[in-house]
């Protein structure tokens, strides 16, 4: 459809290089707009051009000007008609060029409108699937089918957390479907949520989702980090899965970095369960620990985090810290003496380090630095 905004902007642009009078008509021959003050509100010849899908040529009433009516077709369907009136040997060439240009513009606007409509539909669908705990699995399956997606396909949620708003602003112009047209993609609340069709995944699910995140990074202006569960989910667990990914946004954003591989919730189960313990419980147990002098808490967090992530393997942890193994051993010895623990060889001491590491990170640098000064 040729709307008034498209028609008016097109005529304004054409007037810069052409002196022909231009009229735009809709699919039933009604005048949309034009730069000809004598144009009638409707035209039988414009309607005939639309109905016949053919160019109609004539002359003005006084016989001094050529009049051309050319249908505007998009995918073979008439969307309206463009009319040129004037004197000039190039009127036929100009008419053909303007017609093709307008057809391209109308088709583009039609595609963009359909895309915006689909994105709006997808947002409503994804919100229902991911954010409405009261919806049953049958209702979620019905919503998928109603939106044109199969409910029998396995999909895994992937959430893209961008570093800036520019990615969200450009989202309507992007195509983030990968390897399948059954990917459900929506943007809301400052992130993009993808229900990724993984039916074509071969082998490791995490490797396939990592490949998808790489596709997004290579084919869009996305900069930020991606999160997924890392194990199969389904229609009944989408709401819980989205809650887990929201937890990752809250608890891991500072340490996640940008533009790296996706983070998987299953890799942070220890951290998740630690976060479920009330904060005051940690304070009751560890508040006096902060009062101990001679502890560089920033170093403690850095060292023990590397040890925890590497299952207290000194060689692997030292590589993560970019220090020699002996340097790590020296630092660890300080904490062994200070707290009378041996986390490398004692399971209970490992638990102590995990809990204390989590508590110190939650306390924040301002409070722990204040204790260091005291």
Image: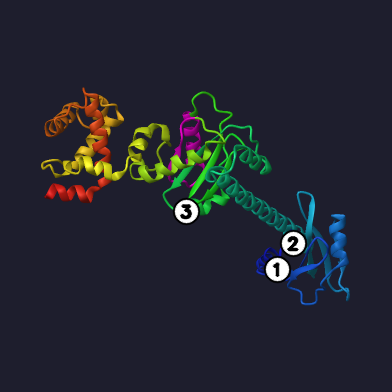
Q: Secondary structure at mark 1?
A: loop
x and y percentages locating residue 234 in the rendered image: 55, 33
Q: Is residue 116 magenta?
A: no
Residue identifier under label 1 = 18
Determine whether label 2 and label 1 are within 8 Å by CB.
yes
x and y percentages locating residue 215 in the rendered image: 51, 38
Determine whether label 3 and label 1 are within 8 Å by CB.
no
| Horizontal arrangement in the rendering, residue 300 relative to residue 236 (left or right) | left
Number of other residues with Cα within 10 Å of mark 3, as a class: few under 14, some 14 to 19, many 20 or more: few
Tell me which corner region of the image, top left, top right, bottom left or bottom right, holds residue 224: top left
Q: CA distance from mark 3 to mark 1?
A: 38 Å
Number of other residues with Cα within 10 Å of mark 2, as a class: few under 14, some 14 to 19, many 20 or more: some
| Up-down relation of residue 77 to residue 284 (above or below) | below
Residue pictured at 73% horizontal, 73% vertical: 35
Q: Is residue 218 magenta?
A: yes
Q: CA distance from mark 3 to mark 2?
A: 39 Å
Mark closest to the chain's N terminus, 3 or 2: 2
Residue 249 shows up from this direction: yes
- Which mark is nearer the camera, 3 or 2? 3
Using the image as rendered, state which of residue 179 and residue 263 is in the foreground. 263
Magenta stretch bounds: 206-231
Residue identifier under label 2 = 94
Residue identifier under label 3 = 166
Residue 22 shows up from this direction: no
Q: CA distance from mark 2 to mark 1?
A: 9 Å
x and y percentages locating residue 370 in the rendered image: 16, 51
Tell me which corner region of the image, top left, top right, bottom left or bottom right, holds residue 314: top left
Mark closest to the chain's N terminus, 2 or 1: 1
């Amino acid at each position: 459809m040729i709307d008034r905004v498209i028609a008016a902007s097109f005529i304004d642009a054409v007037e810069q290089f052409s002196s022909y009078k231009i009229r735009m008509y809709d699919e039933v021959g009604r005048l949309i707009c034009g730069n000809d003050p004598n144009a009638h509100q409707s035209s039988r010849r414009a309607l005939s051009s639309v109905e016949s899908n053919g160019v109609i040529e004539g002359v003005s009433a006084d016989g001094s000007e050529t009049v051309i009516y050319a249908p505007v077709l998009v995918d073979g369907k008439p969307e309206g008609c463009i009319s040129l009136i004037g004197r000039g040997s190039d009127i036929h060439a100009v008419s053909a060029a303007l017609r093709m240009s307008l057809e391209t513009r109308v088709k583009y606007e039609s595609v963009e409108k359909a895309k915006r409509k689909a994105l709006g539909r997808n947002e409503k669908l994804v919100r229902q699937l991911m954010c409405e705990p009261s919806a049953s699995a049958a209702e979620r399956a019905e919503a998928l089918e109603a939106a044109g997606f199969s409910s029998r396909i396995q999909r895994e949620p992937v959430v893209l957390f961008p570093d800036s708003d520019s990615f969200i602003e450009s989202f309507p112009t992007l195509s983030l479907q990968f390897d399948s047209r059954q990917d459900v993609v929506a943007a809301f609340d400052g992130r993009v949520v993808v229900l990724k069709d993984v039916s074509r995944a071969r082998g490791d699910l995490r490797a396939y989702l990592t490949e998808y995140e790489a596709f997004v990074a290579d084919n869009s202006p996305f900069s930020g980090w991606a999160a997924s569960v890392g194990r199969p989910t389904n229609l009944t667990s989408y709401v819980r899965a989205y809650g887990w990914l929201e937890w990752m946004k809250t608890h891991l954003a500072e340490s996640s970095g940008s533009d790296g591989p996706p983070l998987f919730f299953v890799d942070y189960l220890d951290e998740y369960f630690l976060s479920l313990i009330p904060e005051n419980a940690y304070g009751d147990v560890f508040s006096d620990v902060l009062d101990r002098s001679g502890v560089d808490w920033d170093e403690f967090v850095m060292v023990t985090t590397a040890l925890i992530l590497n299952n207290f393997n000194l060689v692997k942890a030292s590589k993560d810290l970019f220090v020699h193994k002996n340097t790590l051993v020296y630092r660890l010895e300080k904490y062994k003496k200070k707290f009378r623990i041996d986390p490398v060889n004692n399971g209970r001491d490992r638990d102590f380090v995990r809990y204390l590491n989590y508590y110190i990170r939650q306390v924040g640098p301002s409070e722990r630095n204040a204790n260091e000064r005291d």
